Image (cartoon, rainbow, N blue to C red):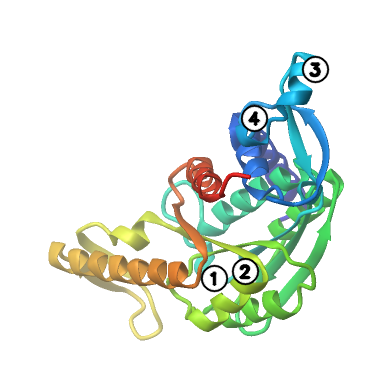
Amino acid sequence: MDLKELIQSIHLIEIRTRKKLQGGLASSYRNVFRGQGMEFAEVREYVSGDDVRLIDWNVSARFHNLYVKQLMEERELSIVIAVQCTRSMNFGTVHKTKFQMAAEVAATLIFSALHSGDRVGLVLYSAGDAVTYIPPNKGMNHGFLLLNRLLEQKIVGDVPSSYEVLRFLTYSLKKRSVVFLIGDFIYADMHTETLAAVSRRHDLICIGVLDAMETEGPPDGVFPFRNEACPRGFTGVSPATREKYRSLVEERLAELKILLRTSHVDSIFLQTHAASEQELHRLFMERIHAIPPH
């Protein structure tokens, strides 16, 4: 991607992200990731979407307007977003590739965090022990730096090393953080022990990104293919083959969801042709409802 394309991509993602935040994602993010039960810091005016359990009724009655309590950790959360950068993420058959989708989701999380006054950092991981880390910081300039670094990242390696990135998140992040791990996941080995280790140290959330053809399989018919052994070959996909493929993918996804749940990790799986903000909002609302009242 040349400089002009990079600037256009950053501008386009920033516009899309701003619309998502205005649509309510910023409020749901702020509600679920505020420091529950932490030291009271101050009050601020109520914003649509704020957790009603945090309304300070005494202050609200005194000033004839709604005010909510702001907790100390709400202003000092450390958010780390880890994005898979292997070749499988370059796959896409509809509107965008999985990596483009992951970049938009990462941008949404980056600017949600910055709008809430949090620090946000970035981890880029591919095959083996190839891990790039930009530590958390504040400010919109830092947000654009992260987005720029993400979009200019080279996509290399075949099999993502989930073990290595999970070890990095466990032992290299010194401060407890909210960690979003973004990847396709179905091609990597993920183990309960390493997931649980990260989950004990950090608040880990996995966001899977998949293309429709990966979950549904190719349409029925005959398709050309090329490889070294057969430069011009054809392969056929029957309804029975497609159904068997779809069944195997469903089994793999079910195994992954059970693995994540037993490791106490929240997760969602997004499709490249669908709107990510709806699923993110649903995840945030589920976490809000899981938080016990004060």
Quarter of the image with the N terminus is: bottom right
Asked if residue 274 lies left or right of residue 183, the reply is left
Q: Circle 3 — which element?
A: helix
Please give the name of the residue rendered at 43% of the width and 46% of the height, measured from the top-left corner. 273
Per the model, the C-alpha gap separating discs 4 and 1 is 33 Å
Where in the figure is residue 231, as x and y percent of width and height?
A: 36, 78
Discs 2, 1 touching: Cβ within 8 Å: yes
Residue under label 4, please give it.
22
Corner quadrant of residue 80: bottom right
Per the model, the C-alpha gap separating discs 1 and 3 is 59 Å
In the rendered image of this protein, does residue 263 appear above or below residue 29? below
Q: Nearer the viewer, mark 3 or mark 4?
A: 3
Discs 3, 2 touching: Cβ within 8 Å: no
Please give the name of the residue rendered at 81% of the width and 48% of the height, measured from the top-left corner. 72
Q: Nearer the viewer, mark 3 or mark 2?
A: 3
- Mark 3: few/some/many CA within 10 Å (<14, 14-19, 20+): few
Please give the name of the residue rendered at 74% of the width and 21% of the height, measured from the top-left corner. 60
What residue type is disc 3 on?
A: Arg
What residue type is disc 2 on?
A: Ile
Per the model, the C-alpha gap separating discs 3 and 4 is 29 Å
Q: Nearer the viewer, mark 4 or mark 2?
A: 4
Asked if residue 10 lies left or right of residue 253, the reply is right
What residue type is disc 1 on?
A: Arg
In the rendered image of this protein, does residue 90 appear above or below residue 192? above
Where in the figure is residue 40, as x and y percent of width and height?
A: 80, 44
Residue under label 1, please give it.
87
Corner quadrant of residue 152: bottom right
Whether residue 288 is visible here, answered yes or no, is: yes
What residue type is disc 4 on?
A: Gln
Per the model, the C-alpha gap separating discs 2 and 1 is 6 Å
Residue under label 2, please give it.
155
